[in-house]
Image: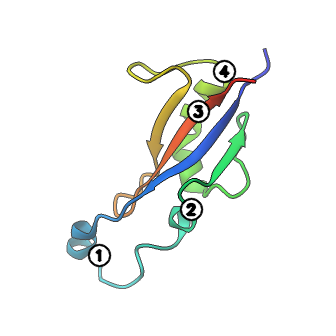
């Protein structure tokens, strides 16, 4: 069985300003860099390998979910073929919608 394509779409970018204020040294712009350089609505497609342009840390966080969807699996409580995940940057998480592309 050939794997399905999975579309990875940037759906939300956030900054936890309270945590930044409390737990960082105050330097840097927390709204740019890494996943925050992606645009809402920007998407990538893959059958299991990291697509070009996805930040390495985000790919490490989502790879296991992409593989389940690419192999035809689903997640309990989610619509079939769909999952939402985010990168593990607690100061500025970016959320991604993963969806199996049925061709």
Q: Residue at x 42, y 52 (%)?
A: 88
Tally of marks:
4
Mark 4 Cα shell of 10 Å, populated few (<14), some (14-19), many (≥20) = some
User: Disc 1 to disc 2, how far (Cα)?
Assistant: 25 Å
Q: Residue 41: x, y in percent?
A: 57, 53
Residue 6 location, quadrant = top right
30 with respect to 59 (left or right):
left
Name the N-terminal-most of marks 2 and 3: 2
Q: Residue 94: x, y in percent?
A: 45, 55
Which SS class for mark 4? loop
Q: Which residue is mark 3?
A: 99
User: Disc 1 to disc 3, how far (Cα)?
Assistant: 35 Å
Q: Which residue is mark 2?
A: 39
Q: Which residue is mark 4?
A: 71
User: Disc 2 to disc 4, how far (Cα)?
Assistant: 27 Å
Name the N-terminal-most of marks 4 and 1: 1
Q: Which residue is mark 1?
A: 24
Name the N-terminal-most of marks 1 and 2: 1
Using the image as rendered, state which of residue 88 and residue 81 is in the foreground. 81
Using the image as rendered, state which of residue 3 and residue 25 is in the foreground. 3
């Amino acid at each position: 069985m050939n794997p399905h394509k999975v579309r990875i779409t940037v759906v939300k970018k956030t900054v936890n300003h309270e945590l930044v204020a409390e737990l960082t040294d105050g330097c840097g712009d927390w709204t740019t860099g890494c996943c925050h350089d992606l645009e809402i609505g920007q998407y990538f497609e893959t059958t299991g390998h990291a697509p070009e342009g996805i930040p390495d840390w985000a790919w490490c966080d989502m790879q296991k979910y992409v593989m389940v969807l690419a192999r035809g699996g689903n997640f309990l409580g989610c619509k079939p073929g769909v999952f939402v995940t985010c990168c593990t940057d607690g100061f500025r998480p970016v959320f991604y919608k993963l969806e199996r592309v049925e061709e």
